[in-house]
Image (cartoon, helix red, strand yellow):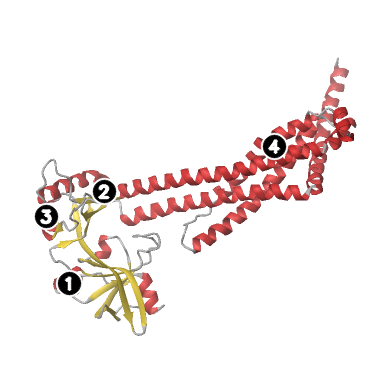
């Protein structure tokens, strides 16, 4: 018995030691088969690459959208709300949007628990700024009260914030954003320089730091703005002095922001003398509402683009399966000869699966490169915000392997199940 046992272990060891050589031989034959059918291989690689390219762009754009959403929420601030005149959610016909007054601002400062900063704001769109022989059209000029940068948690790169005296006396001063500062002054400091805002000379007293966040439109940056005292903006641009368009309120204890929001709503409804059945004539937006909207938007983007990527990948898979079935039919004699000289069905199965894996992995690598290039082009055009991460490469490789195994298994099984005699006879016909 010990001798028989030793002989059995030796046989098992020999079989195991032959497996790496057998596997290497199978891989070698798979590569040779792909090289022998270059046109077919390139067609499959191209089909898979298109699907993986779509997946790459989609994953990168979704990751970029999520990152941008978090940046916007961080910029908005977890301890603040923004009140806008009018009900922007329901938008009833004929509703007024000028509903926020200075009395509202004073009531909030005086009576709202937890509030420590109240910032009324107005704005004027598309204003040309001039300095010397340089012009820049700012998408928005904002009028605000004192401590604008502090209220928005927006650090100053240099200079000072708007002061209470600037507001009281309607001073012709302004904070300048990073974009107009670079357009008008290049690398030089804008602080202390005087620019012209619709023929009004305005001295720059502070420069806001770069934030790099879009707002008010996908192609409009929050850095592209000028901030003036609200009294100056109202007077010089002939605006109604009784109302303002927006109101930013910051609170102590941001973890109680929902309660603060409810208290603010009750106070404004009381100030506006709205009855129990009347809808709000204002809109309160907090970071949670912003995040909910952006999450819903991103979720819709994921669903839409996910279906697109899935369809593209399925197309690549069907191309692989059809061409592999065609290859099995054309290579019947080869398969029959290999089986006749001792190749097992498992070896045939592994060879065809290996061919599928090599094709899809090659397509994945090319698809990732194509997707990154396409994504960068769209990003430069401002159409997408992309974020490249290792997750893209991992998902692409997993998708490539899934295509190979799902769509390559049936052709491989068909090749492995061919009877050698029937295969040779069919080839002779």
- Circle 4 SS class: helix
Across and down, in percent, residue 14 comes to: 85, 30
- Circle 2 residues within 10 Å: few <14, some 14–19, many ≥20: few
Looking at the image, is mark 4 or mark 1 earlier in the sequence? 1
Mark-to-mark CA distance, 3 and 1: 26 Å
- Circle 1 residues within 10 Å: few <14, some 14–19, many ≥20: few
Looking at the image, is mark 4 or mark 2 earlier in the sequence? 2
Mark-to-mark CA distance, 4 and 1: 72 Å
Mark-to-mark CA distance, 1 and 2: 29 Å
The residue shown at (88%, 18%) is 3
* Residue 408 marker: 4
Discs 4/3, front: 4
Q: Which residue in the structure is indicated by mark 1?
A: 238
* Residue 89 marker: 2
Front residue of 91/152: it is 91
Looking at the image, is mark 2 or mark 3 earlier in the sequence? 2
Front residue of 91/112: it is 91
Discs 2/3, front: 2
- Circle 4 residues within 10 Å: few <14, some 14–19, many ≥20: many
């Amino acid at each position: 018995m010990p001798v028989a046992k030793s002989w059995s272990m030796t046989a098992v060891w020999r079989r195991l030691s032959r497996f790496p050589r057998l596997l290497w031989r199978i891989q070698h034959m798979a590569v040779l088969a792909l090289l022998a059918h270059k046109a077919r291989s390139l067609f499959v690689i191209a089909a898979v690459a298109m699907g993986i390219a779509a997946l790459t762009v989609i994953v990168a754009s979704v990751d970029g959208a999520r990152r941008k959403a978090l940046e916007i929420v961080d910029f908005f601030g977890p301890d603040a709300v923004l009140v806008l005149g009018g009900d922007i959610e329901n938008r009833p016909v004929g509703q007024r949007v000028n509903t926020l007054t200075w009395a509202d601002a004073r009531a909030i400062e005086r009576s709202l628990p937890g509030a420590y900063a109240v910032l009324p704001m107005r704005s004027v769109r598309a204003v040309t700024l001039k300095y010397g022989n340089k012009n820049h059209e700012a998408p928005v000029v904002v009028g605000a009260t004192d401590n604008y940068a502090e209220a928005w948690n927006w650090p100053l790169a240099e200079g000072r914030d708007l002061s209470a005296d600037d507001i009281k006396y309607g001073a012709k001063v302004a904070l300048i954003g990073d974009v107009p500062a670079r357009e008008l002054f290049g690398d030089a400091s804008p602080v202390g320089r005087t620019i012209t805002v619709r023929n009004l000379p305005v001295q720059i007293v502070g420069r806001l730091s770069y934030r790099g966040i879009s707002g008010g439109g996908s192609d409009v940056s929050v850095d592209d703005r000028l901030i003036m005292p609200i009294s100056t903006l109202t007077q010089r641009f002939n605006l109604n002095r009784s109302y303002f368009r927006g109101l930013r309120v910051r609170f102590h204890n941001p973890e109680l922001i929902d309660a603060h929001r409810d208290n603010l709503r009750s106070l404004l409804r009381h100030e506006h003398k709205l009855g129990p059945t009347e809808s709000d004539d204002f809109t309160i937006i907090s970071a949670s509402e912003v995040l909910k909207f952006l999450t819903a938007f991103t979720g819709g983007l994921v669903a839409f683009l996910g279906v697109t990527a899935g369809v593209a990948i399925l197309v690549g898979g069907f191309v692989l399966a059809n061409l592999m079935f065609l290859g099995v039919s054309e290579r019947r004699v080869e398969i029959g000869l290999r089986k006749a000289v001792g190749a097992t069905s498992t070896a045939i199965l592994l060879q065809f699966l290996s061919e599928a894996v090599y094709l899809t992995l090659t397509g994945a690598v090319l698809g990732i490169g194509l997707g990154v290039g396409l994504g960068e082009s769209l990003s430069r055009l401002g159409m997408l915000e992309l974020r490249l991460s290792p997750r893209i490469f991992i998902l692409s490789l997993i998708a490539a392997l899934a295509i190979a195994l799902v769509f390559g298994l049936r052709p491989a099984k068909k090749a492995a199940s061919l009877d050698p005699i029937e295969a040779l006879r069919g080839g002779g016909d």
